[in-house]
Amino acid sequence: MELKTVTIEKPETTNFILGQSHFIKTVEDIYEAIVGTNSQIKFGVGFCESSGLALVRFAGNEPTLIELAKKNALALSCGHCFILFMENGFPVNILNSIKTIPEVCSIYCATANPVEVIIAESEQGRGILGVIDGIKTKGIETTTDIQARKDFLRKIGYKL
């Protein structure tokens, strides 16, 4: 077995969700979940089929995000993983809808941070062991940091 990292390639502010699923209909179900939850979100999703033709399956409503999803899914090439890129919304807007899709097994991350995916590769195939999401923690927030966090969340409408 060989361990590798795959860096997710994306524009700096683009959010994405990386997860594990178990069935070819994942791309269609994710599409339906997103448009049924928030029709303003632009997105592209890629899904690594893990048997049969073993293709990257894809869907979405924004061509540039679909291409980004296809490219990153192929770079991962891990059985039954999916990667969803989005604009005009945040993972928090659709994450619960994605998690309720019956074939979705787990979510590895939902972020706009730089991400490295830790991959194990054997003769059989590839699998995701985990992710490195963002940078190493630098310390503990101060009273000033707490107030800045609270102010920010209220400014963007996530808290009253």
Image (spheres, helix red, strand yellow):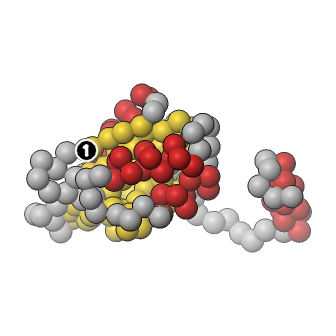
**Image quadrant where one finds the C terminus:** bottom right
Could you tell me which residue is drawn at 42 percent across and 28 percent down?
A: 63
Mark 1 residue type: Val
Q: Which corner quadrant of the image does residue 145 belong to? A: bottom right
Could you tell me which residue is drawn at 58 percent across and 63 percent down?
A: 136
- On the image, the x and y values in percent for residue 48 come to 26, 51
Q: Which corner quadrant of the image does residue 106 belong to? A: bottom left
- On the image, the x and y values in percent for residue 81 come to 32, 57
Query: In the displayed structure, does residue 122 sit left or right of residue 129?
Result: left
Query: In the displayed structure, does residue 64 sit left or right of residue 74?
Result: right
Between 141 and 48, the one nearer to me in the picture: 48
- On the image, the x and y values in percent for residue 9 come to 43, 41
Query: In the displayed structure, does residue 87 sit left or right of residue 80?
Result: right
Query: In the displayed structure, does residue 148 sit left or right of residue 129?
Result: right
- Crowding near pointer 1: few (<14 within 10 Å), some, many (20+)? many
Residue 12 visible in the displayed image: no
Outermost residue on the front side: it is: 36
Between 45 and 98, the one nearer to me in the picture: 98
- On the image, the x and y values in percent for residue 54 come to 16, 50
**Image quadrant where one finds the N terminus:** bottom left
Residue 63 visible in the displayed image: yes
Could you tell me which residue is drawn at 43 percent across and 56 percent down?
A: 18
Q: Secondary structure at mark 1?
A: strand
Q: Which residue is mark 1?
A: 56
Could you tell me which residue is drawn at 77 percent across and 55 percent down?
A: 158
